Image (cartoon, coloured by chain):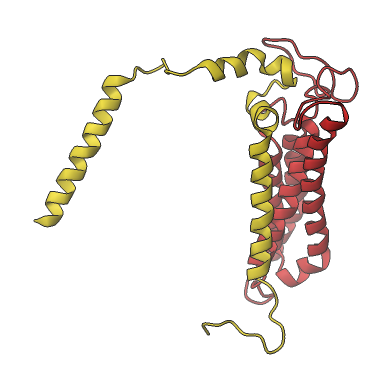
Amino acid sequence: MKKMIVLLVSLLILSAFLGVMALTFTFGAPKMTDMDDYFLRFGQEQTGTNNQCTSVTFDFRGFDTLGESTVLFCAVIGVALIFRKMQAGEEHENE
Amino acid sequence: MSRIVRTAADIIYPFILIFGLYVVAHGHLTPGGGFQGGAVIATGGALVIVAYSYVEVREWLSGKVLMGQEVIGLVGFIGVALLALAFGQVFFFNYLNASGSLFGIPVPYGINAGELNTGGFVPLMNFSVGCEVWGGLTLVILYMLSGLEKEGC
């Protein structure tokens, strides 16, 4: 019984959320397009790339890619730390 | 694994390598880029590691070389971005675009055929990120599959 109520309420909330979305926004007409239009209009001339995704990730938002590269670097270091060879006398704690 | 799998891996691996390098090199013209191309090359490394055993692959693939590749990629990425300061511009400014030198052919607005020698420093960024992802993901796969024994598979 309690499970049914929880399910019903969550279904109601989800349908209300999606219904508001469907009634408020129209498909194909996004609200904020200033930045997209800027990228599409000036991206080719300012970065020289035909691929606009690459022009955004590597030029307009290069800082994001820098952080992404750093995250990958740290992830590799973490994996290397976890899978390292155990020294003599060194053991995993929970074994 | 069996001889069939090893032979197939031997044949397919160069093509995976070439395709990955193509995706990296044409990152500023076609879908793809440094991350995607590096991931494609890393899957080739995974294929070889699974087809052969970890012990055999360990003799060909050095972890130090892969780690050096990763470090060179990351430092090259930051270095290319920092070079903009030497040209009197801000960090991450595309100083090579439309300069007439390396990767410097100007691109007009609209549909065009696409020239490999365009893009400013974006191809250099793609190469360094591809180098980093290649080394990093192959290193992760190498570490994670280090349990594969010679007899077990």
Examine the rendered structure and indicate whether residue B110 appears above or below residue B95.
Answer: above
Q: Image height check: is B132 above or below B96?
A: below
Q: Is residue B15 visible?
A: no
Give the residue drawn at x 77%, y 40%. B21
- Looking at the rendering, which quadrant does residue B107 occupy? top right
Image position of B35 with respect to A41: above or below: below
- Residue B1 locus on image (x, y percent): 67, 67
- As drawn, is B60 to the left or to the right of A95? right
Report the residue at 71% width, 59% height from top. Answer: B139
Task: Check the rendered structure and report the hue given to chain B.
Answer: red
State the image quarter where residue A29 is shown: top left
- For the point 71% across and 48% down, the residue is B133
Q: Chain A is shown in which shade?
A: yellow
| The furthest residue to the bottom | A89
Q: Position of residue B116 (x, y in %)?
A: 81, 24
Residue A34: % across, % down: 53, 16
Above or below: residue B58 compared with residue A66: below
Residue B106 visible in this rendered orientation of the protein: yes
- For the point 71% across and 56% down, the residue is B138
> Is B12 or A64 nearer to us in this picture?
A64
Q: Quadrant of residue A79?
A: bottom right
